[in-house]
Image: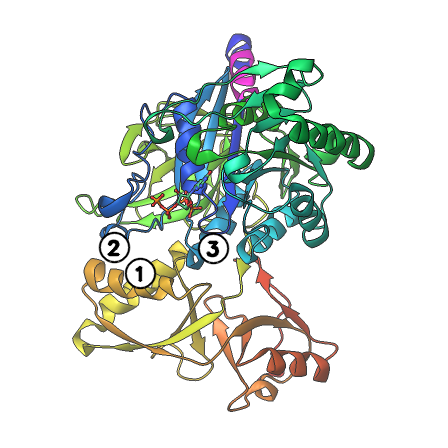
Amino acid sequence: MSGTDFERARAEIARRRTFAIISHPDAGKTTLTEKLLLYGGAIHLAGSVKQRGSGRQTTSDWMELERQRGISVSTSVLQFDYQGRRLNLLDTPGHNDFSEDTYRTLAAADCAVMLIDSVKGVEPQTIKLFRVCRLRGIPIVTVINKMDRNGREPLDLLDEIERVLEIPCQPQNWPIGSGASFQGVYDRVQRQLLRFERAQGGGARPAPMQLAEVDVPELRTTLGAGAHARLLEELALLDGASPPWDREQFLAGKLTPVFFASAMTNFGVEPLLQAFVELAPGPRPRQTSRGLLAPDAPAFSAFVFKIQANMDPRHRDRIAFARICSGVYRREMPVLHARTGKTLALSKSFQFMAQERVQVEEAFSGDVMGLWDPGLLRIGDSLCEGKGHEFEGIPRFSPEHFVRVREADPMKRKQLKKGLDQLAEEGAVQLFFDRWRLEREPLLGAVGVLQFEVTQYRLEHEYGAAAHFEKLPYQHARWIEGEVTLDRFERPGSSTCVLDVEGRPLVLFESDWALRRAQEEHPTVKFIAAVQPGRSSRAAGRTAG
Ligand code: G4P
């Protein structure tokens, strides 16, 4: 790379902001995504991401099943420019059952927007996803949505976030009323009032904004004496009680800036976006087998965080989504596939805007691209220019639902095996074998039951192999490490032991109680809820039998 090329690459990398939105279903993620794209100029009329009513579907719907069910199960990457920054929004599936996909997507993000419903507050999925961000040290920007509804007291919501998620909040703006009496927000950073006015046409176009100083006397008249007095009181309280803004703490995931908004009516979306591009960090350094890698290191490298087969039924192909972590990608460039040591020419690579595929000629650290994959790539794989390194793996989370697979047609045994192997590699489900019969009648585990439905549908439609899934009573799974006889876990009505695709033992428990009892009975054994795939572990079972 020449000096000028290098400088240009550094500038391109520095302007990337790669993030994901995390939330409990129904908090308004699709709505917010749509509005961010609207303000980002990527779409012109809100409503094209998810059409409301009967024809409800999203433009990131790829699979026929998604269309039938009206849910989005695929992760897509939406790219748009705003104020000189290039934003890569990783669109994570909103449905509860696809949270594993969301976990993996977070590995590719540098920042997350945590969206909370002002009526419901912190919900179970918010907690789960927040914990993943915390584990990865991902900075979080909090947005409290639906301020146009009669929500909970803002102080109460902040208190809940601080108590349940154990992260101090730093409100960047403060709401004046809510629901029917919602009048807008006071921007504590810019010291401005943003008045709430419902936009014409159902809030599908940018809402008008009026700005005023908070201490001007007219404000008392505008807001009403009561609301004005309350605002002044609450602002004084916040000035005294909320922690000072500390960028380092935010970047370390230890402090979250909070914005109040109403995505549906567009209120607060533009100020959020303006603040977000300033707050959000650029591409972060990544941990590799050769130490910490700077995002502007000249050699290209990327890791695969998602594989999606048969995205386009017309092409029957398989796309691996890779996040670039250093350098520049150029079409046809030879790269080392670190796991196999093979050199690949990455000639077919795409960026996606919903259903449209665009061939990528050049992409920079921070970007995500879809690579056409003949079946070589796996989740967690590293692709590098020059000397190879491996990125820190993407953890595999323990499933909570289990089925036994029974072939519907013995003539299709090969197809079934191929389908199961590929779908497991893709990470759609996890494949397990019992310790004796191995290949016959394997078990599948998933974080959510809908994944089984998708798997069954795809086995039949993509691999021509119908299968029966028999539900099993297990609720928890733990990989185990330590000296123990695996037979100890064979307890009908309580637990059983299986092996994962890498031969690591995993105990399935029928209840919380069964898990707790096993932990108490085997204090020296480690019961692990998330493992790194492909890494050898000092697995239990040396005395297995
Ligand atoms: P999700 O992707 O997080 O699951 O949420 P989504 O955007 O689909 O929003 C869930 C519901 O919440 C939708 O209503 C949506 O219109 C509504 N919503 C989103 N943001 C706001 C907001 O700021 N204020 C209010 N009042 N509602 C909001 P729905 O009834 O499920 O769909 P629809 O009938 O509106 O299409």
Q: Amino acid at mark 3?
A: Ser
Q: Is residue 273 above or below residue 73?
A: above
Residue 218 spot, x, y in % from top left: 64, 14
* Cα distance between the residues tagged 2 and 3: 18 Å
Numbered badge on residue 65 = 2
Magenta-colored segment: predominant secondary structure: helix
What residue sits right under mark 1 in the picture? 454
Residue 198 located within the stretch drawn in magenta: no
Q: Is residue 334 visible?
A: no
Ligand 1: quadrant of the figure: top left
Q: Please tell me in which quadrant of the rendered image residue 465 appears.
A: bottom left
Residue 300 spot, x, y in % from top left: 50, 29
Closer to us: 176 or 276: 176
* Cα distance between the residues tagged 1 and 3: 14 Å
Side (left or right) of 273 relative to 231: left
How packed mark 2 is, by other alpha carbons closer than 10 Å (few <14, some 14-19, many 20 or more), is: some
Side (left or right) of 79 relative to 118: left
- What residue sits 29% from the left and 63% below the top? 418
Among numbered discs 1 and 2, the one appearing first in the sequence: 2
Among numbered discs 1 and 3, the one appearing first in the sequence: 3
What residue sits right under mark 3 in the picture? 99
Q: Amino acid at mark 1?
A: Val
Question: Circles 1 and 2: CB distance less than 8 Å?
Answer: yes
In the rendered structure, which segment of residues is drawn in magenta? 7-15
- What residue sits 62% from the left and 72% below the top? 480
Side (left or right) of 4 relative to 174: left
Q: Farthest residue to the bottom: give it.
A: 492
